[in-house]
Image (cartoon, helix red, strand yellow):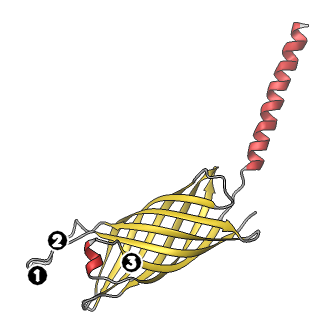
């Protein structure tokens, strides 16, 4: 009796674990997305650049895939933004970043993500034709909803901290100071689900 009970218990345990593992493997699938966004870009209000640069338009593209957890996603992306100046110079920026996205546990038809990322930003200023790459940090937030099987529509906001404090002021410009850039990007976006 004890031997039969022990064997039954072992079979139940191993079969149960196998079925549970199979269920977990089937519930998680690779779900890549590619997305586009377009919208206003502006220096962060009150930052040093906000006194020199005006709001303009920008756009970008990103690729996202789920890690072996549907709560966390990895994202890489780039964009282009142009900032008019209230004086003579204008600014072109092209960030390239990698980020980790966290799916917020909010029970709504909408999907909400909080993002943290790092990368580099290419900066080109006119008319003095100065260009450089600077390290950046990204904080982001987005909300989207499904518009069919293959498409999600939503909005995103990204904050970029561009570190330029390591640069030395030009020696022939007394009083010139180097400041870090704080930039905001708002966008309407479309995500395409490449796998369902």
Q: Residue at x 40, y 85 (%)?
A: 82
Q: Position of residue 50 (x, y in %)?
A: 30, 77
Q: Earlier in the sequence, mark 1 or mark 3?
A: 3
Give the residue pinned by disc 1.
173
Q: Earlier in the sequence, mark 2 or mark 1?
A: 2
Distance from the alpha carbon under mark 1 to that under mark 3: 27 Å
Distance from the alpha carbon under mark 2 to that under mark 1: 11 Å
Mark 1: which secondary structure? loop
> Looking at the image, is 120 positioned above or below residue 175?
above
Q: Residue at x 60, y 72 (%)?
A: 35
Drawn side of residue 50 relative to residue 67, left or right: left
Quadrant (top left/top right/bottom left/bottom right) for the N terminus:
top right
Drawn side of residue 51 relative to residue 119, left or right: left
Give the residue pinned by disc 3.
42
> Looking at the image, is 39 positioned above or below residue 15?
below
Q: Position of residue 52 (x, y in %)?
A: 26, 82
The crowd level at tag 2 (other Cα within 10 Å; few <14, some 14-19, many 20+) is: few
Q: Quadrant of residue 30?
A: bottom right
Q: Nearer the viewer, mark 2 or mark 3?
A: 3
Q: Position of residue 47 (x, y in %)?
A: 28, 71
Q: Which mark is residue 140?
A: none
Q: Nearer the viewer, mark 1 or mark 3?
A: 3
Q: Residue at x 85, y 24 (%)?
A: 11
The crowd level at tag 1 (other Cα within 10 Å; few <14, some 14-19, many 20+) is: few
* Marks 1 and 3 close (CB-CB < 8 Å): no
């Amino acid at each position: 009796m004890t031997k039969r009970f022990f064997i039954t218990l072992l079979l139940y345990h191993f079969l149960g674990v196998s079925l549970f593992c199979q269920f977990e493997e089937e519930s998680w699938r690779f779900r890549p997305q590619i997305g586009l966004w377009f919208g206003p870009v502006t220096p962060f209000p009150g930052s040093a650049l906000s006194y020199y640069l005006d709001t303009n338009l920008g756009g970008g593209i990103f690729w996202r895939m789920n890690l072996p957890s549907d709560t966390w996603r990895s994202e890489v992306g780039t964009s282009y933004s142009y900032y008019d100046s209230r004086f003579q110079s204008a600014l072109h920026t092209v960030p390239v970043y990698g980020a980790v996205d966290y799916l917020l546990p909010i029970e709504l038809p909408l999907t909400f993500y909080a993002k943290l990322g790092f990368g580099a930003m290419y900066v080109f200023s006119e008319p003095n034709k100065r260009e450089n790459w600077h390290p950046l940090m990204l904080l982001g937030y987005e909300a989207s909803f499904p518009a069919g099987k293959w498409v999600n529509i939503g909005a995103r906001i990204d904050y970029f901290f561009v570190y330029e404090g390591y640069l030395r002021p030009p020696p022939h410009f007394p009083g010139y100071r180097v400041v870090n850039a704080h930039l905001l990007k708002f966008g309407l976006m479309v995500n395409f689900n490449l796998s369902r």
